[in-house]
């Protein structure tokens, strides 16, 4: 699931979810499929995962959420979808940064404007 979500393999993700794979399963470093899909900007997979119970507020051990990943990589559509589907823009990572802070740090102006101050 994790590799398929990161690679944007919609059909594979769909089949794995139908087969009962946990939408919140994690990598060894604490990233969920939703974190990986968000960072890569795969909106179809983001939607599918959330429809199957993926939690858009789960944080990695460093405190990053899927919204942080989408924001700092500049994926405007993924940021918009996550916000519409329950992501919390006020959550801070271990460095005290919100997703907006991460986007600003990485020069993602359009995303910064989309996220609340």
Image: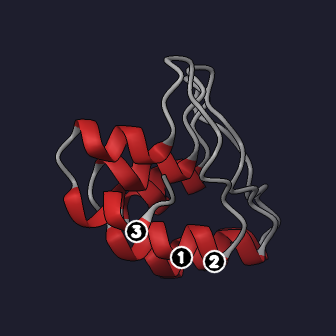
Q: Is residue 13 above or below residue 89?
A: below
Q: Are marks 1 and 2 in contact (CB under 8 Å)?
A: yes
Disc 2 marks which residue? 84
Which residue is at 79% across, 55% downward? 22
Q: Earlier in the sequence, mark 3 or mark 1?
A: 1
Residue 74, quarter of picture: bottom left
Q: Is residue 33 above or below residue 51?
A: above
Out of 24 and 108, give the one closest to the viewer.
Answer: 108
Q: Is residue 76 above or below residue 58?
A: below
Say the numbered circle drawn on residue 81. 1
Q: Secondary structure at mark 1?
A: helix
Q: Are marks 3 and 2 in contact (CB under 8 Å)?
A: no
How far apart are labels 3 and 1 at the CA level?
11 Å
Give the side of residue 81 with respect to residue 108, left or right: right
Crowding at dot 2, Cα within 10 Å, few <14 / some 14-19 / many 20+, comes out as: few
Residue at the far front: name it.
117
Give the side of residue 99 with respect to residue 18, left or right: left
Which residue is at 17% across, 46% downward? 107
- Between circles 3 and 2, the one closer to the viewer is 3
Scheme by which the image is coloured: secondary structure
The quadrant in which the N terminus is found is bottom right
Out of 87 and 58, give the one closest to the viewer.
Answer: 87
How far apart are labels 1 and 2 at the CA level?
5 Å
Give x and y (percent) for residue 61. 63, 21
Disc 3 marks which residue? 114
């Amino acid at each position: 699931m994790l590799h398929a979500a990161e690679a944007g393999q919609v059909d594979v993700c769909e089949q794995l979810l139908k087969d009962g794979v946990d939408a919140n399963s994690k990598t060894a470093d604490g990233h969920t499929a939703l974190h990986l899909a968000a960072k890569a900007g795969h909106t179809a997979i983001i939607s599918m995962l959330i429809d199957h119970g993926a939690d858009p507020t789960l944080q990695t051990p460093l405190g990053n959420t899927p919204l942080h990943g989408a924001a700092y990589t500049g994926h405007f559509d993924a940021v918009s979808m996550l916000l519409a589907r329950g992501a919390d823009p006020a959550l801070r990572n271990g460095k005290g940064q919100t997703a907006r802070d991460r986007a600003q740090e990485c020069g993602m102006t359009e995303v910064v404007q989309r996220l609340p101050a």
